[in-house]
Image (cartoon, helix red, strand yellow):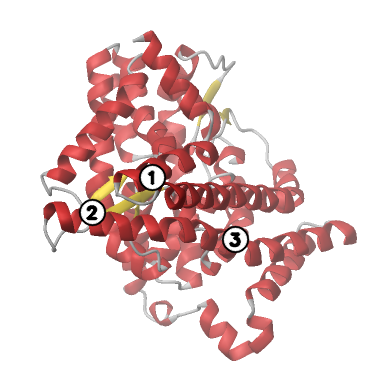
Amino acid sequence: METLYNIVRTITEMGATAILPIIITILGIVFRMKIGNAIKSGLLVGIGFLGLTLIVDLLNTSLEPAVSYYADLGSGFTIADIGWPAVGAASWVAPFAALSIPLGLLANLLLVRLKWTKTLNVDIWNYMHFLIPGALVYFLFGSFWMGLLVTLLMSIIALFVGDWIAPKWQKYFGLEGTTNTTIIYSAWGYPIAWAVNKVIDFIPGVNKWNLSLDKLNRKLGVIGDPAIIGFIVGLILGLITKRSLSEIITMAIGIAGVMVLMPKMVGVMMDGLSPIGKAAKDFMVKKMGKDSKLNVGMDIALGLGDPTTITTTVISIPLVMLFAIILPGVQFFPIGLLMSVTYISVMCAMASKGNLFRSITSTVVFCIITFYLAGFVAPGATEMLNSAGVGLEGLGTDVTFSTLWNLLIYWFSTI
């Protein structure tokens, strides 16, 4: 078991940028691609993901002056928002972590073979989202088998949710042959965004607002171009947060750069994924009949190339910080949560079909829900994190604890 754990831990510590090329290359070979073509596909996917990571870092750096401005306004928060990287690392301390990936992959292959699912999840890096509730169960209830069962159950649920959202995902983002298996966003973020859109549908007048970047582009010409919009948003953010002229210009150019570069990196990833998707389709038709179809389950980052998603992110971040300050009963300032807004906005844009107003509204609502649910689960989250060796002095939490399943796990542990 220890050897298996060390192997799995070594692989996951390589990060998604290194894991994805390996997994995609192996898949390509399994699906009868030529070895050279499989390696090329794997490298392109890895390079695209690396580019996305660098551009997200650029976005965070560009927004940092605005984040600092709002953080200085806040006071009286009693819970630390530690961010998903620390929580994800802590989840791998669970003793069944080494078993979760091979067992999860075996279950996935079996379900595909039985034609119960059309999703093949290659997003091994995000097994941490399955492990977090499993680890929470283990550390709160002290049961190895309960923790492992919950982890595997989450990995299976992600497949069926992947099947459910695949048509919407592919239609909106144009990502044929793929779906999303990052369960916190597919099974939690998307339903919340869907519900917000349904509420808006019942509000007279507001339900007619249909603000999209495509319409802005047609009406405003060059001013509606994503680069110009990003630059203007950066200027406005800099002005309302009282930054210096040099900081305002840096923010504006940084955000404009994100608007332009993000779709190009997604394009690089798709250059690698498209041959894999075709090979998978041909393989499934040969093995399981002409009606068979296989969708590759990928990280939520694959949807970051959408201009509405990027614009939603940069507008939502200052709004989320503002609501954290003015709403009653919020117990933490969302430093860690802000790292996730980029990814939250993906499903919100998809659920809103590119309507910018609805995308921003649902993103902010998701974050407000997180304020309260993550705060409620904080005692259980802190017990898990401290048991895993994080060593918090007070209470700690994260957006990953705000889901319905983690809420139920913690609630059952208190009764």
Q: Where is residue 401 shown, x and y percent of the image?
A: 41, 34
Helix, strand or loop under label 3: helix
Q: Nearer the viewer, mark 3 or mark 1?
A: 3
Which of the 4 quarters of the picture holds residue 199? bottom left
Q: Nearer the viewer, mark 2 or mark 3?
A: 2
The residue identified by callout 3 is 262
- Badge 2: few (under 14), some or many (20 or more) residues near its Cα, within 10 Å? many
Q: Which mark is residue 198?
A: none
| 137 is higher (above) or lower (below) than 337 | above
Give the CA distance from mark 3 to mark 1. 19 Å
Residue at horizontal 21%, vertical 39%? 109
Q: Amino acid at mark 3?
A: Met
Q: Where is residue 60 shown, x and y percent of the image?
A: 67, 49
Residue at horizontal 38%, vertical 51%? 34
Sequence-wise, the earlier of marks 2 and 3 is 3
Name the foreground residue: 203 vs 63.
63
Q: Amino acid at mark 1?
A: Thr
Q: Amino acid at mark 2?
A: Phe
Q: Which mark is residue 283?
A: 2
| 45 is higher (above) or lower (below) than 224 | above
Side of 65 relative to 414 (left or right) = right
Sequence-wise, the earlier of marks 3 and 1 is 1
- Badge 1: few (under 14), some or many (20 or more) residues near its Cα, within 10 Å? many
The residue identified by callout 1 is 182
Q: Is residue 94 visible?
A: no
Query: Do residues under tags 3 and 1 come within 8 Å of each other at their CB atoms?
Result: no
| 347 is higher (above) or lower (below) than 26 | below
Give the CA distance from mark 2 to mark 1. 25 Å
Q: Is residue 289 visible?
A: yes
Q: Quadrant of the C terminus?
A: top left
Name the foreground residue: 71 vs 182.
182
